[in-house]
Amino acid sequence: MSLLPEGRRFLLAPSLLSANPLSVEASIARLGGEEDWLHVDVMDGHFVPNLTYGPGFVRALRARYPDAFLDVHLMVQPPEDFVDSFAEAGADLLTVHGEATPHLHRLLGRIREKGCAAGVSLNPGTPVEWIAPVLHLADLVLLMSVNPGFGGQKFLPEVLEKVTALCRRRAVRGESFLVEMDGGLGPDNVDLVVSAGCQVVVAGSAVFGAPDPAETLRRMRHSGEASTHGGSCGA
Ligand SMILES: O=C(CO)[C@@H](O)[C@H](O)COP(=O)(O)O
């Protein structure tokens, strides 16, 4: 199963972490429908040093936006304790961290059994080899380009090498996972990550902190689409 619609090079996923917590609906309205997915960062104060949402938030989003694609990033440990409840709340894609469980193989299978697409994420300091044995079970690999926990951090360019490694491996093995990148992204560097081969771009503060979030997404889409393909990796 590919999550990338035919003819699309990449998707934009605004991170609700940077939305106004007192008026999430108003923040989403300011996207003007320019978003492809809504990215939901779930943080537990244990795997990462911050706290955010529970399954109730995802359930409320699903009820309010029945057609939205809900991209739920679980920064929790152990993720096994939360996969069922977030799936039942209405997530479309559930991404768990490779560093957060010794049972990644079983867990990706469980996510798919629950009817969601299965994603696996890596912190900036974790090599892609860590998840090599489970890539055939993944619909998406989420590469963090900041240390997870907070919005508004600076993009770590060394993570781009991981995109190259993943795209090469995918081509050789005929795998179908998408590569998503998250952290420090916006209109000024979206071309860099799309040309490296990223197919889903998450952006929080650059979008919701802008005077016109819809226009910012349009600029990001234009810049990503205009970027040159990156050798063997370009999507
Ligand atoms: O998961 C995270 C942070 O842990 C991200 O989704 C951030 O929300 C991205 O925010 P910006 O770096 O785009 O401000």
Image (spheres, rainbow, N blue to C red):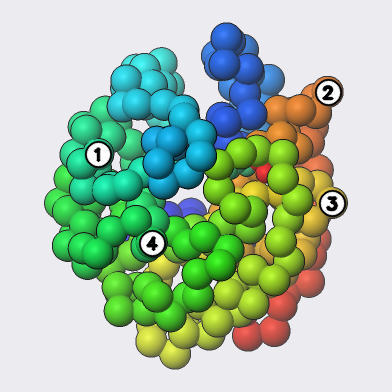
Q: CA distance from mark 3 to mark 4?
A: 30 Å
Which part of the image, by quadrant, shows the N terminus? bottom left
Up-down relation of residue 229 to residue 206 (above or below):
below
Q: Quadrant of residue 54?
A: top left
Indicate the amino acid at tag 1.
Phe
SS state under label 1: loop
In the rendered image, which residue does mark 4 sit on? 99
The residue positioned farthest toward the top in the image shown = 22
The 10 Å Cα crowd at callout 4, few under 14, some 14 to 19, many 20 or more, is some
Q: Nearer the viewer, mark 1 or mark 4?
A: 4
| Mark 2 or mark 1, earlier in chain | 1
Q: CA distance from mark 2 to mark 1?
A: 35 Å
Asked if disc 3 and disc 4 are in contact, CB closer than 8 Å, the reply is: no
What's the residue type where badge 3 is placed? Answer: Asp
What residue do we see at 58% from left, 10% from top? Answer: 23
CA distance for labels 1 and 3 = 35 Å
**Direction from residue 113 to residue 24 in the image, left or right:** right
Name the residue located 81 percent from the left edge and 47 percent from the top edge: 187
Image marks 2 and 1: residues in contact by CB distance under 8 Å: no
* Secondary element at image label 2: loop
- Disc 1 versus disc 3: nearer the observer: 1
The kind of residue tagged 4 is: Glu
Q: Nearer the viewer, residue 17 or 123?
A: 123
| Quarter-of-image position of residue 8 | bottom right
Q: Nearer the viewer, mark 2 or mark 4?
A: 4
Residue highlighted by disc 3 = 188
Report which quarter residue 177 is drawn in.
bottom left
Q: Which residue is mark 2?
A: 211
Residue 180 visible in this rendered orientation of the protein? yes
Disc 1 marks which residue? 82
